[in-house]
Image (spheres, grey):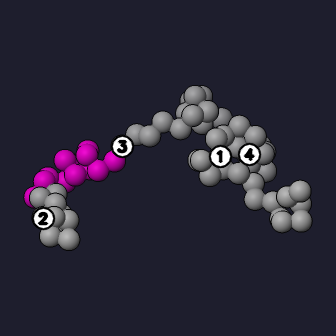
Amino acid sequence: MDDFRAQCRRQLKRSLDSRIKYGFFRNYKPVEDDEPVRYFEKMSDYRKWADENLPRYLGYKIVKPIEDAE
């Protein structure tokens, strides 16, 4: 816990610009980031596309009721 507190104190000494610059990172998301823009008529269209095309680990899967899972 002492190490964590020391790290927090060091970070607070940085300028706001530096904290913003180094506080975020760009994470590539396969399929989703491959096209600059996608448009869908309805949210259900987007959800269907995401369920069929995006990797499961991104969390874009439609949850089906237990009785429909078989």
- Left or right of residue 57: residue 2: left
Mark 1 or mark 4: name the one nearer the start of the chain.
Answer: 4
In this view, the residue farthest toward the front is 70
Circle 4 sits on which residue?
51
For discs 2 and 3, the disc positioned in front in the rendered view: 2
The reply to whether residue 43 is visible in this rendering is no
Earlier along the polypeptide chain: callout 2 or callout 1?
2
Q: Quadrant of the N terminus?
A: bottom left
On the image, numbered disc 1 is attached to which residue? 56
Residue 17 is inside the magenta segment? yes
Residue 42 x, y percent position in the rendering: 77, 48
Identify residue for label 2.
6
Q: Residues within 10 Å of mark 3 (few under 14, many from 20)?
A: few
Binning the other alpha carbons within 10 Å of mark 4 as few (below 14), some (14 to 19) or many (20 upward) gives some
Residue 14's place in the image compared with 50, above or below, is below
Residue 31 in sight from this viewpoint: yes
Spatial separation of the CA atoms under disc 2 and disc 1: 37 Å
Mark before the other along the chain sequence, 3 or 1 = 3
Q: Earlier in the sequence, mark 4 or mark 3?
A: 3
Q: Amino acid at mark 4?
A: Asp
Which one is closest to the eye, mark 4 or mark 2? 2
Mark 4–mark 2 distance (CA, rounded to whole Å): 43 Å
- C-alpha separation, residue under disc 2 versus residue under disc 3: 23 Å
Residue type marked 2: Ala
Q: Main secondary structure of the magenta part?
A: helix
